[in-house]
Image (cartoon, grey):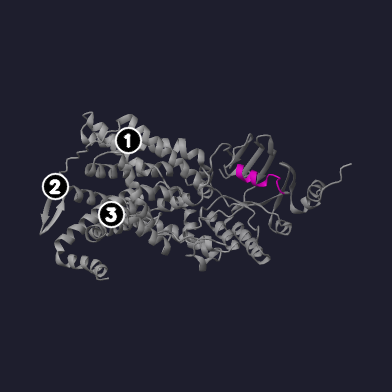
Amino acid sequence: MSEVLRGLVAPFAEIAGNPAFFAEVLIGGVAAGLMYSLVALGFVLIFKASGVFNFAQGVMVLFAALTLVGLMERGIPVPVALVLTIGVMILLAFAIERVVLRPLVNQEHIILFMATIGLNFFLEGFGEMLWGANVKRLDVGIPDTSFKIGSVLVNRLELTAAITAAVLVTVLALFFQKTGIGRALRAVADDHEAALSLGIPLRTIWTVVWSVAGFVAIVAGVMWGAKSGVQFSLSLIALKSLPVLILGGFTSVPGAVAGGLIIGVCEKIAEVYWGPLVGGAIENWFAYVLALAFLLFRPQGLFGERIIERV
Amino acid sequence: MNDGGPLLEVEAVSVRFGALMALHQVSLQIQRGEILAIIGPNGAGKTTLLNVISGFYQPSEGRIRFAGADRTRLRPPDVAALGIARTFQNVALFKGMSVLDNIMTGRLLKMRGNILTDALWWGPARAQELAHRAAVERIIDFLEIQAIRKTPAGTLPYGLQKRVELARALAAEPQLLLLDEPMAGMNVEEKEDMCRFVLDVNGEFGTTMALIEHDMGVVMDISDRVVVLDYGRKIADGTPEQVRKDQAVLDAYLGVAHE
């Protein structure tokens, strides 16, 4: 009994005992959280515009990173390679709209979802075919070293990633919340026919949104790639953004941010302070438990649209 | 452009789905400012005709002219841009959005061209949003749906959803408004309201309207002219009085003894 009690209380004593270390953990959590947000954002954009969960988002991140590294390996300077990668992702968006989405207008969402699963496997194979399957190092010129603010240790790479993610997320949130296009997106997601009849150009909207999602994938790919190398497991971080989406709501850009931060911070704290008590590796499943608990109480997420069911 | 000619001309339009002729050589005109009712038994091709006019179906044969200009092969968003708005047989509202947002989407065409500058230019973008909001509020007052402004559209009773759909179509300030069974599934009171709104819209804004309706009482009351379809062919076209006495129409509705 006293064992359990000590287990529950001791971590709090630890937190109070070393606030500087706690701050480091917190910063690490926020940084990781913003990176999750970045991936989740790609999902939200496409979900908002088509009501479809894009299974291929994670692979798009991998594909973007692979393309960038592949180009750099061929001696193309970073800025040029970056612009080329953006071009590739926009081309990809056009191709997806033309080949996958356009023939499926007005189909059930589940059918579009299946299509994105197909897309997932295609992109995975295509990426490997083009650039090979080896783990690649991505060096964007930011050293993976730390410096001190007061007594708190901060990692340069993580800080850069966090700031980039924060800026991108803010810009996109404003763009989609405060402009007519946000309303058009929601309209398209709700009812293709009605949106068309109001003069909303479905194809343009889809191409724009998939391009933006591709761009977000590049940023996420670069940040994650620089941190842990460009390899197949990169596509699995998409799974990590699932709980983020459940927490934040599938349709909300600010939700993706809030969800990412909550997950990032909670799982870091849980891992560092409570992890040792149960033998570690909490980080791998904590987010999903959090998401499950959330589903019970607020299935639409923190900022999602109300779920309406007329009986 | 406003030459007094018909607003919309459908010339010998046929629509074929495989072996099925949904529309067969249908010709009709919609005059400026009139309310035209399209009637006919189930499966007569009424909704197909509306879908052809609004660009959802492409005609297999024939031509469609709007305000004198040929526009046979346009897609729905282009048709909308020309000033043709429509409602759907099974209400097609954006269910998760509020009534206000639903109606605001009707103004998207009027905001076009600003999609990208919107995000950068706070002042003008906001002023524009306010102007559109004012226009939408006028429509909300007009259709007497002030109280449900903030309600998610999907939670409304059916009759009100139909009214919101009409509001959304009106928000585009169309020249031609196509209504697919605007009164289906309504009770007598709701039908009377809807009739009043249709007549008011026509009277106040001069909006030309074509509507599909099954309730003959409604059709005879509000329409200037009636077109009757049966098995994809036009079998009558005239004033309500003429159509009411037309033998072909009576046969189509009541059946005719084949000997």
Magenta highlight on residue B110: no
| Viewport quadrant of the N terminus of chain A | bottom left
From this viewpoint, is residue A284 visible? yes
Vertical side of A137 occupied by A185: above or below: below
Question: In the image, which residues are magenta?
Answer: B42-52
* Residue corresponding to mark 1: A87
Mark 3 and mark 2, same subunit? yes
Q: Nearer the viewer, residue A286 or A177?
A: A286
* Residue corresponding to mark 3: A283
Q: Is the residue marked by circle 3 packed among few (<14), some (14-19), or many (20+) residues within 10 Å?
A: some
Instruction: Tell me which amino acid carries mark 3.
Output: Glu
Q: Nearer the viewer, residue A184 or A190?
A: A190
User: Tag 3, which secondary structure?
Assistant: helix
Instruction: Tell me which amino acid carries mark 2.
Output: Thr
* Residue corresponding to mark 2: A145
Of badges 1 and 3, the one in the foreground is 3
> Is B130 left or right of A21, judged from the image as shown?
right
> Is A63 left or right of A16, judged from the image as shown?
right
Residue A173: image quadrant is: bottom left
Place of residue A174 in the rendered image (x, y in percent of width and height, measured from the top left): 33, 54
> How far apart, in angstroms, are the residues tagged by discs 1 and 2?
31 Å
User: Tag 2, which secondary structure?
Assistant: loop
The disc placed on residue B86 is none
Mark 1 and mark 3, same subunit? yes
Magenta highlight on residue B49: yes
Looking at the image, is mark 1 or mark 2 earlier in the sequence?
Answer: 1
